[in-house]
Structures are given as structure tokens and as C-alpha cells.
Amino acid sequence: MGRGKQLKRLRARLDVRPRVLIVCEGRVTEPEYINIVRVQEKINLVKIIVDDEGGTPKTLVDRAVEEKKRTARSQFGKYDEVWCVFDFDEHPFIAEAKQKAQANGIRVAMSNPCFELWLMLHFRYHSAHITRRDARRACEREIAGYEKHVPSEVVYPRLETAIANARQLARWQETRDGSGKNPSTDVYLLIERLRAASKSALIEQIAHKN
């Protein structure tokens, strides 16, 4: 095979492996959990940026837009998908943040009231209004030694349960015209996209072997 064909084949392989950027509000729990999924699902082309300044969802979206524009001209650095992960909590300008994200092709995984709701759904379905404090206490009851730490061996085996519960909760909220209201979480959408990215890369690898 000529060198030109080899290079063309290499570029094709790189092009179909989606690059995903995830900008997180939380400094520990969210990036730690996403890394668990990344490692277990063997997803390589994922970059996680953690907001070290304790900003708002709007500042997270601003950072994501900036990073997306910065890498847009790079052939191998360009991101196929950009996500922001943040809590509803008591943050201001949630609507503005989501509107700016949508206008710039950035997807949002928001949890209301907080990311701990997503962790709760690994263990049981929950549809009643819940506070951040109660969600955190529920995680402490379910996860031994939970103090803003997520053990892979506890949560990952329950991932399918969490996705099913989150999807059921989203459908229930939609019937009440309460999409995005307490309680709700879009994290399952991010996880599904990461798994899809992993699967598409695997299919491409198999295709090039044949």
C-alpha cells in the first residue's frame, strides 16, 4: 500500500473518533464520575475542564464557547461535541446560560437541584422535590464513606439503573410540563453520548482491521 493511501486511511480513522470537551462546575465529584465512565467504557478522546473559580453556569458556558472557538481551526484539536455540566441549585442566569449554549452548539447536562440526584438514581427512582442537602445525605447513606468521592466499584455497576431511572424521571416531568424542574437531571444524555462515541470508535477499528 502506498504512503498516500496509508495517510488517507489514518486521517479517516482519526476523523470518526469523536473528540468531546466537558466543562464541569464541580471540582471533584463530577469530573471523578465522568472519568469513571471514560475509563470503564474505554473512551480516549475526552477532555475535562474543571471550573476552579467557582463560577456560575453562565461563566461555564462562556468558557466552553471560548475553548470551542479556540480549537475550531485545528484539524486534530477541534471538538465534535462540547458539554457543560452544572447544577441548577440557586444559580442566577440559568436561562441565559442555556440560551447561549444552544446558540453556540454546546449541550448542557444540568441537574436540579444538584449532581447528587444523578448519583441517587443509581440506587432508586426518586420523583419528589428534594433539596441539595437531602440529596447529599441520600448519597452518604447509599455510598459508604461518601464525602465528595465516588467509588467506581459502587456506582459503575449500577449505571444502567441510573440511566433508566433518569429517563423515566424525564418522561414524568414532561407530562407535568416540568422539564428541567426539581427533581431532574440530564446527565444520562451525556453518558449516552459518551458511550455512543466509544461504540463508533470501536466499529471504525474493526472496519479497518477487515
Image: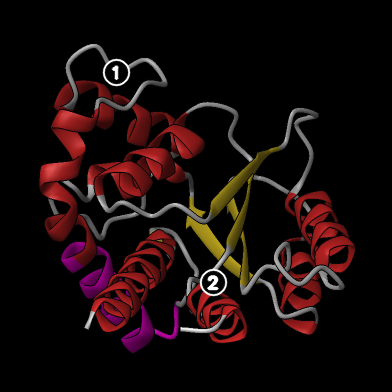
Tell me what residue is drawn at x 42 percent, y 29 percent. Answer: 133
User: Given the image, on which type of amino acid does mark 1 rest?
Assistant: Tyr
Residue denoted by label 2: 14
**Does the CB distance between marks 1 and 2 fall below 8 Å?**
no
Tag shown at residue 137:
none
Q: Secondary structure at mark 1?
A: loop
Q: Is residue 117 left or right of residue 154?
A: right
Quarter of the rendering occupied by the C terminus: bottom left
Q: Give the CA distance from mark 1 to mark 2.
A: 39 Å
Above or below, 21 relative to 80: above
User: Given the image, on which type of amino acid does mark 2 rest?
Assistant: Leu
Residue denoted by label 1: 146
Type of colouring: secondary structure
Q: Is residue 40 left or right of residue 178?
A: left
What kind of secondary structure does the magenta stretch mostly adopt? helix
Q: Is residue 100 left or right of residue 22?
A: right
| Mark 1: few/some/many CA within 10 Å (<14, 14-19, 20+) | some
Is residue 20 visible in the rendered image? The answer is yes
Spot occupied by residue 63 in the image (x, y as percentages of width and height): 82, 52
Seen from the viewer's position, the closer of residues 111 and 137 is 111
Tell me what residue is drawn at x 25 percent, y 60 percent. Answer: 127
Tell me what residue is drawn at x 28 percent, y 56 percent. Answer: 128
Q: Magenta residues, as a range?
A: 164-178
Spot occupied by residue 205 in the image (x, y as percentages of width and height): 31, 72
